[in-house]
Image (spheres, helix red, strand yellow):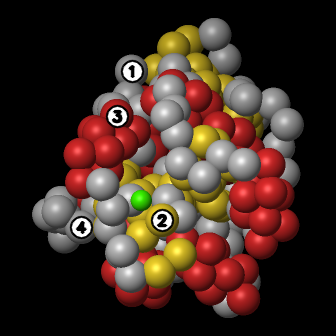
Amino acid sequence: MRLLIVEDDAVLRDGLQVGLSACGWTVDGVGRVDDALAALEASAFDVVVLDLGLPDGDGLEVLRRIRDRRMEVGVLILSARDAVADRIEGLDTGADDYLAKPFDLDEVAARLRAVRRRMLGRATPALRHGSLTLDPKARLAWLGDRSLSLSRREFAVLEALVERPNQVISRSQLEERLYGWQEEIGSNAVEVHIHHLRAKLGRDAIRTVRGVGYTLT
Ligand code: CA
């Protein structure tokens, strides 16, 4: 999962970036409304963690833009505004969830997983495809009864494929999901992860659709 943190308090933003990266996610951060809008145009994020009180405007402007443009992005508002009326306004503007500051990082992570599940139309925490099972919280995967030893990025690739089992996922979609702004992407990085996954899952588990991307078989 790729996340955008929109938070003007640099200490809090860095804390969220470090804490949520430790959950295995790719996390970028900005501190202003205009930077958030530019980031959303430039990169494909799965969920935005959105503060409301920002130096150049209101976080609800970012939320309205996301919903007006029909971007497929989940939004968790994380705000010091904790009145019932604020929560209602945030949710009715299109947020998927609303959490008041101060917050507990583990709860933020759990709510992000829940937002992602709902976006994908799933109710169960585990992801399943054929004999493959993934636990997104523990970041563990099994093929039948056999547990698989996967790197963070191998798990992220497999999770992306299992989330949308009937679709072809392009290399650039996988790169967006795996690498944040600060991270160098090797030209064949995705191919290397796919190669390693095939070695662990079986050669035919992931099909290459030439010129398009990858899909699970
Ligand atoms: Ca703020």
x and y, in percent, of residue 134 in the image: 61, 29
Question: Which of the two discs, 3 and 1, labels the residue nearer the N terminus?
Answer: 3
- For image coordinates 50% across by 27% down, the residue present is 104
Amino acid on which the number 2 mark rests in the picture: Gly
Question: Which of the two discs, 2 and 1, labels the residue nearer the N terminus?
Answer: 2
Name the element at disc 2: strand
Question: Which of the two discs, 1 and 4, labels the residue nearer the N terminus?
Answer: 1
Name the element at disc 1: loop
Q: Name the residue under label 2.
A: 53
Question: Which of the two discs, 3 and 2, labels the residue nearer the N terminus?
Answer: 3
Instruction: Compute the Cα span from label 3 to label 1.
Output: 23 Å
Q: Name the residue under label 1.
A: 149
Instruction: Place residue 188 in its image quadrant.
Output: bottom left
Height in image: 210 above or below 122? below
Instruction: Place residue 92 in its image quadrant.
Output: bottom right
Say which of marks 3 and 1 sits in front. Answer: 3
